[in-house]
Amino acid sequence: MSPTLKGWLSSLSLGAVLAAAGIAAAEAPPEAAAKAESRVGAQVAAAPRTPPRRSGPFTLAVIPDTQYLFDEDRGNAEVLGRALEWIRRNRVRRNIAFTVHLGDIVENGAAEELAQASKVFGLLDRSNVPYGVLAGNHDVDPRTDDTRGDTPYLEYFGPDRIDDQPTFCGATADGYNTCHLIRGGGRDWLLLALDWRISAGTLDWAQARLDEHPGVPTILVTHELIANDGSGGGVGVLSFYGQYLWEQLIKANSQIFLTLNGHYWPPARTVLKNDAGRDVHLHLANYQNRYFSGSGMIRLYEFDVAANRIEVSTFSPYWQSLSPRRRPPLAEDELALEDDANRFTINLDFEARFRAEAEPEPLPPLPVADLLIPGTLAYWRLDDPGQAGAAVPEGGTAIEDLTGQGNDLLRVTLENGKAEDMTWTEAFHPAQPSRGSVFFNGSKRDPAFGGAYLRTVDTAPINALTLENGYTIEAFIRLPETCCGSKHAWMGVVSRMGSGRDAGKTGGDPSEPVGTFTISPGRQVQWAVFPLNDPGILTNWSFELPRERWFHVAIRNDGRQSEVFVDGSRIQRNPEALNVGISTTGEFWMVGATHYDRIIEQSFFGWIGDVRIVDRPLPVKDFMIAR
């Protein structure tokens, strides 16, 4: 939305909004409707502009599906208008910190319908009331995910409409997913508003937002997640797509404590245990099946952190704004919903639920023999007890291959490199078998900067292997606080010397290495390989790794496909194409570096612990991180 359009919408009164939308005011007689509109219009002008309080109890306002209010010529914009006006008028008194719509704003995704809804949301724009929206299946083509491209929804409700709000903390490049950081109860709260169907890239984006705000209580909002199980008790159950979101994103991130969705009806809720054994509250709110297209119901989540509770209520500002004599008989049942599915209390010990988890105690070290499982080709422990801070030596073997097969590592110092560019440390992953690591001090921004890496000896048997029957490559890594960006872009963890061109490959970029495990500028793991069966290159991607935290990364190939695991969890962005083996030119492997067109521009920047290569796909229970 253009700034001009944004400003015009924010200047409209409720009466102007309804007139511009071309929708009748209410079911009351014309003179009564005019009086009601005049009364609400005066309240609009007097609406408080004071921002909500950052301490004490606060409120999250939720707007469920409004699609039948914007359905060709069968809608009624005033119903939503009065709901938004109630939020604006009560923003200070109820300390409403944020408002979110659950999707299905309109019925047919038509530009005309979205334009009408957009004008109503101008009521919030005018008073700088922070809010977020997301696309439901009726707002966009339901057969698509968030890579669908431009739509009328994006024209009217894209992130540029709300990106100047103080709560806004980012959006996906496609514009269909947004991040919001809310302040209330004396602390921050993260809210992720996700599209009706998110892509693999958005999973990584959402994980990156969580990683950027570790420990921040998080509310995940999307259009579909749970449905009512039909038992009559208001019990929620994950939908098929909801199960996907639960498995891929929610259960592994303990900071997500509440999810909200619409789409299905009647309302329902459930509590599930995440991977950390903590409760996640999942709520469905949707009233479109009820009288008057849902009566513009809104739901309030009133957080009282000091009292360890969240009070939930559901009501219709539209009907409550009309005098009893102007309400039709059926409206009496819609004023407020008092059943257990719509009015309830969540008892939640906020301090205990979001207490930072203590750093795990390191597991006992393991003897080398326990790591030499069948098929182990090379096992390198990048440690030297008692030598912390000392440089890894040059000349002769720097690190021995503990399999005894002769895949020993030599240190190579780049031009302008210094001895201290590769040093022993006592840092290690809590589940790492050994008790140390090597710190690589690499960079490629300063032409005078050196760095150093490790490489296998020329006679190493592993140099010639193509591993067409499968493989597992494992490494423990940790990225420094100042990583990564362009200064350390595409730094290598484990790779092979030799380009695709050297191996006879013509697809993709033949100057790329035949196989390389690298870290992108955005701190994502990339496994890129020229397989034996394809002239091009195939690439796996992880989510964005947080800095200053140890990770175990495993690249696993079963002779058909490659997958990447981080701390034993399979990541999402794995290609399905046939992926057989790793091409080779018979040259050395590298630890702590990669190359482009045979030029090694930089070494790794960070810590690398144990590294192991096995000639078969290992189950997670056999990874080095497992005990």
Image (spheres, rainbow, N blue to C red):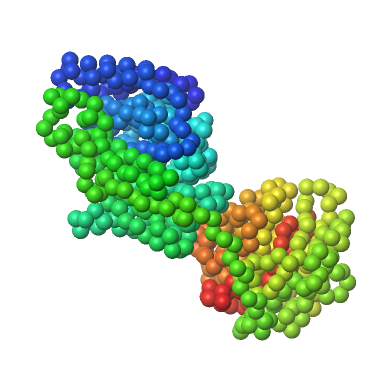
Q: Residue at x 24, y 49 (%)?
A: 340
| 470 to the left or right of 268 | right
Residue appearing at x 43%, y 47% in the figure: 219
At x 18%, y 24%, the residue is: 323
**Towards the viewer: 445 or 52:** 52
Residue 42 lies, with reference to residue 551, above or below; the image says: above
Relative to 19, residue 490 above or below? below
Q: Position of residue 259 (x, y in %)?
A: 39, 50
In the image, taking residue 118 as reference, residue 445 lies left or right, namely right
Residue 233 in sight: yes
- What is the x, y in percent for residue 97? 43, 35
Image quadrant assignment for residue 251: bottom left
Left or right position of 223 against 586? left
Q: Position of residue 202 (x, y in %)?
A: 49, 50
**Residue at far front of view:** 307
Residue 418 placement: quadrant: bottom right
Instruction: Give the residue furthest to the left.
Output: 329
Report the quarter where the C terminus lies: bottom right
